[in-house]
Amino acid sequence: MKDVMGIIYTGEGDALLRELTITRAIAALPVASRYRVIDFLVSSMVNGGIKNIGVIMQKNYHSLMDHLGSGKEWDLHGKINGLHILPPFLTRENVGLYPGILDALRSNTNYLIRSKQETVVLSNSTIIYNAKMDELIKFHQESGADVTLLYTKDPSMKREESGTYISVDERQTVTDIEVDPTQPSCENTYMQVLVIRKELMRELVDKAVAHGLHSMDRDVLQTLVREGHATVKAYEYKGLCWRIDSVQSFFKFNMDILDTEKRKGIFRDDMPVFTKVRDEMPAYYGGNCTMVNSLVADGCQIEGIVENSVLFRGVKIAPNAHVKNCIIMQDGQVHEGAYIENCILDKQAVIKRNSRLIGPQAYPIVIAKDVVV
């Protein structure tokens, strides 16, 4: 893996997450009680032996920078390689928002040139997975492919009018690519992870950007497959994965993690998921509290009833408060006598005494950061 580097693009698709992504990128979304979405992506690369990882950021990247820090939690704070934060270069023309991943890669050409690795694993940040990157890279090298795409057959990953889907023959060669089809006809969902030789990627990016193109999937990969100028292979990921592209999908992932089998499937002993450490006191459970099938992080104070919920660090549930099917992010508070069901509370949100909030399970209520209800 000494000859492989990783790049994570934290750019697109946050509009449908509404209040949750006003001040943060999708990659910085808190999930599973104490993690962020990007933890799974960085950990997959680190577990696969990749030691040089660049994170390309866009607007609202301060939360992500604070979380990643120097990269020491992922053992990425070396002198030569390590974790590289790549914020946008701001000018009057560039206000911190890349039109597409091709523009982001073009803007970070200097980082690519400085990096000594010859192969790149390029990942987007809207899909949570825990993949064996070393096996993906080994397949890429042994197959002799110019580009290798990671895909899944999981039907829950398909979306109408959104996503990229591929057809693969018996030799794992990609024969067709669909981008944002109304009804996907290809059975395989491309997971926005690819392996490519660095110089080939730079050549393709420069040529595409010079012609005013922005999309890797539509403008580069489709062209390669259609014209046959490069060999595009595909490697199947057989583990669990989730696409975080809406409030509903974010809510579903956190609720799925409450299932023991699914939690073991994504948090594997042989492939740990690392995250930023925050030193807190252990969670406190009052004598009259009731806990049912919930994830509770350190620093919480639970004195009421909590059912099927995910509580992040520092959450306080007062006596006689009832929390059901909810996600409560860091330092949230539910005061005495309040009842909330199917709600997502962002950081430092407060539910006042005797309040009652019940959202439909298919469309949970979202309380923005620092809001008092």
Image (spheres, rainbow, N blue to C red):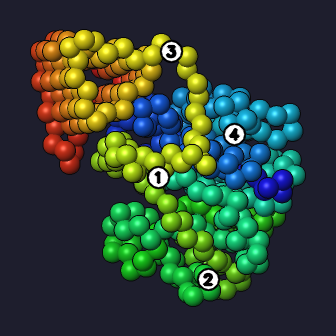
Secondary structure of the residue carrying numbered label 4: strand
Query: For residue 86, which numbered disc appears in the image?
Result: 4
- Distance CA(mark 4)–CA(mark 3): 30 Å
Query: For residue 280, which numbered disc appears in the image?
Result: 3
Query: For residue 265, which numbered disc appears in the image?
Result: 1
Is residue 96 placed above or below 356 in the rendered structure? below
Secondary structure of the residue carrying numbered label 1: helix
- Distance CA(mark 2)–CA(mark 4): 33 Å
Q: Position of residue 355 (x, y in %)?
A: 13, 19
Secondary structure of the residue carrying numbered label 2: loop
* Label 3 vs label 1, nearer the camera: 1
CB-based contact (under 8 Å), mark 4 and mark 3: no
Mark positioned earlier in the residue sequence (3 or 1)? 1
Q: In this view, does 259 lie to the left or right of 165?
A: left
CB-based contact (under 8 Å), mark 3 and mark 1: no
Query: In which quadrant is the N terminus drawn?
Result: bottom right
Circle 4 residues within 10 Å: few <14, some 14–19, many ≥20 = many
Indicate the quadrant where residue 359 lies: top left
* Label 1 vs label 4, nearer the camera: 1
Query: In which quadrant is the C terminus drawn?
Result: top left
Instruction: Please state which amino acid type lies under the numbered disc 4.
Output: Leu
Mark positioned earlier in the residue sequence (2 or 3)? 2
Identify the residue position indicated by label 2 in the image.
Answer: 173
Q: Is residue 191 left or right of residue 320?
A: right
Instruction: Please state which amino acid type lies under the numbered disc 3.
Output: Glu
CB-based contact (under 8 Å), mark 2 and mark 3: no
Can you see residue 264?
Answer: yes
CB-based contact (under 8 Å), mark 1 and mark 4: no
Q: Position of residue 273 (x, y in %)?
A: 57, 41
Residue at (67% x, 48% y) in the render: 47
Q: Is residue 370 left or right of residue 45?
A: left
